[in-house]
Image (spheres, helix red, strand yellow):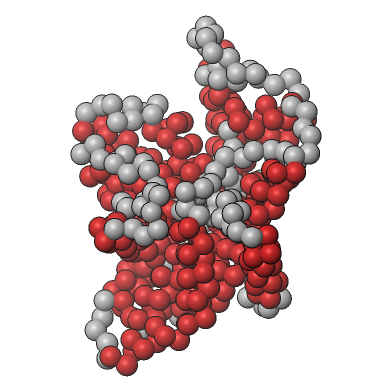
């Protein structure tokens, strides 16, 4: 299926590629960005006294449109670059684009990885299936016990941030960081685990990003399928890190701005992308963007004090960025941050202790992820050396917690369904 050395693509192939890219991006622009551009176009003219009344689209955004359009683009580009042969199997192609476990929220698969798997005869593999079930179990825990539980606190705080004190707003930002992580990485685990039950191997999408020692490491561990997609299909074709410092700065800002805009038609996402570009830029200019490619505290139980503070600082910077990601507009995000910094009475700080149950379950999740951080997901090998009875009690407790939390009214749809 993979071709190594073939002649360069002909001009007609380039025309087909460009047409395909425009078609896919056109679909994305129509459904996701049309109203955004129209609204900003109207605002720009209104600022000079010209008032327009253009038509806007009142259509529902197709679930997961950003994900499967990028998968279709991946196929077209890989075929053009001779990384894979064009398939003659229409069913196989649409199965690749619309593969149900990861259709609505990723990971964003590559044609070179997923498409050939549809043409291989699969037999049931007990070990792989059990591994998939463990990954599904852990994904459900992160989604239902962590993300949905935290959403019950985060949503009211952000919705009524004007009437909240700084301590409560800080807690809201802190909880949102784990809400979005539990929600999105939880879905990825469920999708990858489900695919394993059917004999498919999807790419890893999260690698314990909150254990990162700097922003560059964070972006190698967060939403891996998207960051590597932009790296391979946008950053490297632009020149990557091989040009002048000016070109490197340009390429870095382009990839982060596009990444932010990919998440939604709102200036908050663009500011979020710009913020991370500013944080990331010093590392790539100084050649330190790949300083930490190993696992933190590898082979050890605890991190060093230096690693601990590095992780804390990186996490704090990420949390600050999440405020822009979660806010409805830039003004709300700035006001939210401003109110966090306001001085308060000592009594207000005691509100931190109002969420003891949530802290307890967060501690469980972080502990399990820490001890499983050297694997592809937390439960991959954790507990396999334990006695059978203890291991199954461990799984049973996790399952009971999932069932208990799923029976209340706090369940939320996946955040990334909107993207």
x, y (%) of residue 95?
73, 35
Q: How many marks?
A: 0
Q: Quadrant of residue 378?
A: bottom right
* Residue at x 32%, y 93% (from the top left corner): 347
The answer to whether residue 153 is above or below residue 290 is below
Question: Residue farthest to the top?
Answer: 7
* Residue at x 51%, y 62% (from the top left corner): 368
* Residue at x 57%, y 40% (from the top left corner): 203
The answer to whether residue 274 is above or below residue 98 is below
Looking at the image, residue 75 sits to the left or right of residue 133; the answer is left
Q: Nearer the viewer, residue 249 or 309?
A: 309
Q: Nearer the viewer, residue 95 or 372?
A: 372
Instruction: Examine the rendering and report whether any part of residue 69 can be seen.
Output: no
x, y (%) of residue 113?
60, 31
Quadrant into which the N terminus falls = top right
x, y (%) of residue 140?
64, 62
Q: Quadrant of residue 321?
A: bottom left
Q: Nearer the viewer, residue 73 or 49?
A: 73
Instruction: Examine the rendering and report whether any part of residue 251 can be seen.
Output: yes
Question: Residue farthest to the front?
Answer: 387
* Residue at x 59%, y 37% (from the top left corner): 109
Q: Nearer the viewer, residue 59 or 407?
A: 407
x, y (%) of residue 44?
37, 54
């Amino acid at each position: 299926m993979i071709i190594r050395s073939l002649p360069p693509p002909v001009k007609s192939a380039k025309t087909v590629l460009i047409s395909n890219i425009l078609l896919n991006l056109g679909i994305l622009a129509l459904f996701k960005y049309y109203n955004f551009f129209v609204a900003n176009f109207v605002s720009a003219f209104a600022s000079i006294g010209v008032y327009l009344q253009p038509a806007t689209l009142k259509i529902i955004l197709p679930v997961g449109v950003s994900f499967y359009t990028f998968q279709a683009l991946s196929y077209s580009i890989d075929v053009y670059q001779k990384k894979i042969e064009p398939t003659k199997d229409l069913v196989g192609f649409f199965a690749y684009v619309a593969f149900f476990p990861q259709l609505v929220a990723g990971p964003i698969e590559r044609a070179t990885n997923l498409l050939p798997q549809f043409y291989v005869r699969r037999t049931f593999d007990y070990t792989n299936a059990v591994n998939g079930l463990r990954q599904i179990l852990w994904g459900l825990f992160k989604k239902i016990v962590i993300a949905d539980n935290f959403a019950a606190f985060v949503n009211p705080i952000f919705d009524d941030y004007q009437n909240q004190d700084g301590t409560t707003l800080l807690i809201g930002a802190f909880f949102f960081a784990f809400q979005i992580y539990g929600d999105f990485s939880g879905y990825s685990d469920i999708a990858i685990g489900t695919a394993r039950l059917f004999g498919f191997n999807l790419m890893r999408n999260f690698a314990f990003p909150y254990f990162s020692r700097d922003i560059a490491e964070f972006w190698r561990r967060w939403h891996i399928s998207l960051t590597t997609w932009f790296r391979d299909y946008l950053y490297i074709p632009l020149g990557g890190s091989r040009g002048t410092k000016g070109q490197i700065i340009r390429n870095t800002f382009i990839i982060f701005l596009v990444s932010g805009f990919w998440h939604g038609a709102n200036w908050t996402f663009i500011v979020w992308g710009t913020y991370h570009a500013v944080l990331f830029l010093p590392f790539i200019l100084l050649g330190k963007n790949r300083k930490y490619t190993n696992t933190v505290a590898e082979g050890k139980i605890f991190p060093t004090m230096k690693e601990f503070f590095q992780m804390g600082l990186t996490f704090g910077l990420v949390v600050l960025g999440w405020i822009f990601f979660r806010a409805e507009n830039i003004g709300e995000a700035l006001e939210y941050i401003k109110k966090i910094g306001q001085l308060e009475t000592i009594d207000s700080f005691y509100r931190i202790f109002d969420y003891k149950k949530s802290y307890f379950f967060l501690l469980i999740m972080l502990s399990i992820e820490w001890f499983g951080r050297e694997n592809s997901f937390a439960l991959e090998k954790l507990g396999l050396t334990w006695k059978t009875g203890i291991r199954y009690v461990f799984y049973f407790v996790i399952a009971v917690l999932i069932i208990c939390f799923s029976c209340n009214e706090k369940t939320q749809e996946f955040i990334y369904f909107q993207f």
